[in-house]
Amino acid sequence: MLLAAGASLQANGKSFFPIYDEANSGAWQGIDYDGDPWVFNVSRPYFVTAGLQNRHLSLWASHGRYYYADRDVWKWQRPNLFCTNEDLFTQTIVVPYLIPMLQNAGAIVFTPRERDWQTNEIVIDNDDAVKSVYYFEKEASKRWKNCDSLGFANRYRLKDGENPFRMGTVRQAKATKRKKTSQVSYQPRFKEAGKYAVYVSYQSLPKSVSDARYIVYHKGEATEFSVNQRMGGGTWVYLGTFDFDKGCNEFNRVVCTNKASRRGVVTTDAVRFGGGMGNIERGGYTSGLPRCLEGARYYAQWAGAPYKVYGGRKGENDYADDINTRSLMTNWLGGGSVYMPAKNGKHVPIELSLALHSDAGYNKDGKSTFGSLAICTTDYNDGMLNSGISRFTSKDFARALRDNLVTDLTAQFGEFGKRYLWDRNYSETRLPEVPSAILEMLSHQNFPDMRIAQDPLGKFYIARSIYKTILRFVNSNHGTRYVVQPLAPQNFSVTQNQGVALLSWTAQLDKTEPSARPTSYIIYKAEGQGGFDNGTIVNTTRCQMQLEPGKLYHFKVAAVNAGGESFTTETLSVLYNPAASKSVLIVNNFHRLASPQVVDDEEKQGFDLNQDPGVSYGLTAGWSGKQQVFDKSRMGNETSFGLGFSGNEMIGKFVAGNDFNYVQAHATSIAASGKYNISSCSSEVIASGRVQMKNYQAVDLINGLERHDGYTHAYFKSFTPALQNSIRQYASQGGRILISGSYTGSDMQTEEEQAFLSDILKLSYEPTGSTAITRDINPEDSTVTERDSIVYTSPNVKGLGLQFSYYNELNAQHYAATHPEILKPVGNYAFTAMQYDTGTSAAVAYKSTTYRSFVMGFPLECIIDERTRTSVLLGILKFLTD
């Protein structure tokens, strides 16, 4: 992931680091949890020593779909504005950005809303009527048997008050230190390959062990977890999110063993894969939406919480119950721990609670940000929390969240509004028995705020600011040092020479955080169609690796320091084929992340999904529908005629974004031929000259949806001047290049850029919807009649002897090329190599005695059928290299 630290902060021409609120209250006064964490990734190749290691946090994105009993309908808690609503929008910051940052810092994060953006769900349980290969017990010296406690039994729908964790049985076995262990295998049948969250369940007994071992097998790789079963029994316990293959096999499953370091018992109950669809009936029917879009009230029931946690209004007011559930579920889990010693519960040592919201409100000028507001509650229970510490530590936390967010967003995007610090009676700050806050991050009603917040870069910085405040607050209250986790590496390349791969990258420094410097790196490796391993630590920015002949490898890299791990680079691939005489360099130039098209002038404001739906960081669940009202004079009108009002047509639909793994897709197709060696790199490396295209017989340039849109806060471009120069030089050296992407023509509109298209790529751009002259020939007398016609593209293409379709509409499987281009040949040696069904040119090929090129008006990786995609790519390479 190439999210960067942004522009440097300057004062009198010199860089400086902003001043942050440390919230140094020392609140815990020696109270601390020093036992085994609830969940620990044993396979992780490093230890966090100055981050949030073994800290247990509860946080959530606001609201969610709920049942409104008075009208017998399911509805949102907030209105649709600027293509989203608060129920959907806030989780697009929390789920893909904030929670991973906290986990990368070593924290165990609980959230009372489903976190998995996956509509599929498979539950494997010992009480299933049909077990077959799905559930299997293997016994060594210790036998599995039922324990006395009730456990989970799967019900596809639940009525109000029903508890699935009181409907079944639980298995147990005595723990052992021996290598030969008794095991229970949970092997689902996946209808679709993809990412699935994995949840386990068990019961906490007096003799439960604190380090029960689970192994997650994902696409053939194994990741081992230690789970402290002395806490958190009788609910879903999140291990992680993994890639699984379609089908049912031993390479995609979860195994619970009875291995432990101490005497005791291991219990095991159901294992759940995927977030799934909502299954709680209210008024006789479910919401019909993915569970992740529902409120906490319904997840709490599915997770085995008692009725008093989520049903305080006895089913008459789900709105109020949902608000209270978020905090009460935190207390239910944390009760009995050192942080909530006087409360009954599951003994999970949760020490912090945070509710993340967006607020209403707007500035009439339509230009300035409305800003952030934070809330705490000190006047409750004599100003004390359950552990006996002062509630004023919550005020410290709330102030730090607000002030630091304003500081960070001002540094990156210009002046950002600072609103109030409220000390008031709100459920989400009154009910938690640990320090807590509500952060109204920004206003979802004020377009300048949303222009930042709908940009994935803005989401990243909002999340990173919140993560850093939590890091500072937790460590200062325990009197321990902290280090901010680094940013992702840059300038990544993987090249091979005679079977030796050279991996190279550079550090990306955070100009606002002096401690966020990497001290080492993790290289993640996958082979062929297998999953990524758990990583290997290296201490330099270069690494050599011996390659097995004929085996395709994929790599990504993360930076590490004492504070944790960064997000990763894009995925790159390499292949050594001793029999090959030709080498292909795959270049990833698709780094763009963007909000939908920004409309902002004197009369109109908003996001135009039709013009450009933007590019999210991976999958997103944040859209409600297209904006319908852009009239700035309707600002503040909270009706269907108000500025920003948006539709409902996208509710429940996930949309794929940039997964940064398209080199892997191209390399897989090229490897199928058995004719080429493969190296790959980021386009940054080409532009800087660190990798030379002249060393390769062919170059495959992936442009995807790269373009300079004029509104995104980072700079992206289909062909930067440096990249143009590199391609021009490669052509002069007899190069052979394939280029595919959506904005080759429209993103190159200056005189110099159009000269590059015509002189080097031998094409011109014809805008869709423009008028062209069509010549009709009469077959009887060969007379020619000219007429005007409107030119269009189509999602169906023919070329290279094939007919195929590409992703043209927004969907959950793959990013869509919603704006393919018509590219026309220029010159004697250029010709149309592909056509849309409309008859317009979809690709231009050029073949001369000096160099060859093949340029497509849509991204090659968007071709839907994998076999066809491979045939197309290999056909193009044959044209280029034979």
Image: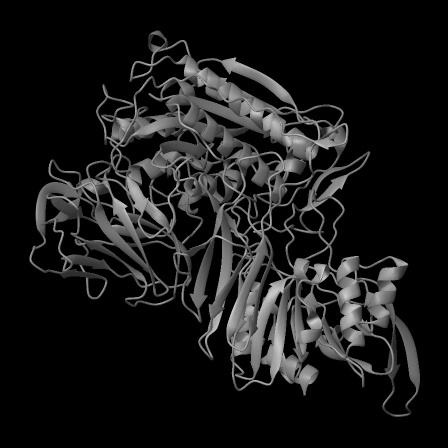
Q: Position of residue 317 (x, y in %)?
A: 38, 26
Instruction: Classify 466 as above or below 287.
Output: above
* Residue 669 showing in the rendered view: yes
At a point 86% along the width and 71% down the height, the residue shown is 759
Q: Position of residue 789 (x, y in %)?
A: 84, 69
Q: Kindly indicate the quadrant of the structure image that contains residue 196.
A: bottom left
Using the image as rendered, state which of residue 718 and residue 684 is in the foreground: 684
Using the image as rendered, state which of residue 350 and residue 561 is in the foreground: 561
Looking at this view, name the residue that lies furthest to the front: 540
Marker count (numbered): 0
Q: Is residue 373 left or right of residue 149?
A: right
At a point 65% along the width and 25% down the height, the residue shown is 370
* Residue 68 showing in the rendered view: no
Using the image as rendered, state which of residue 770 and residue 292 is in the foreground: 292
Q: Is residue 272 left or right of residue 277?
A: left
Q: Position of residue 181 (x, y in %)?
A: 14, 57
Instruction: Classify 484 as above or below 649.
Output: above
Q: Is residue 65 left or right of residue 144?
A: right
Using the image as rendered, state which of residue 337 and residue 789 is in the foreground: 337
Q: Position of residue 472 (x, y in %)?
A: 47, 27
At a point 73% along the width and 23% down the height, the residue shown is 364
Instruction: Classify 519 as above or below 703.
Output: above
Q: Is residue 106 left or right of residue 733?
A: left
At a point 84% along the width and 61% down the height, the residue shown is 753
Q: Quadrant for the C terminus, please.
A: bottom right
Looking at this view, name the residue that lies furthest to the top: 382
Q: Kindly indicate the quadrant of the structure image that contains residue 687.
A: bottom right
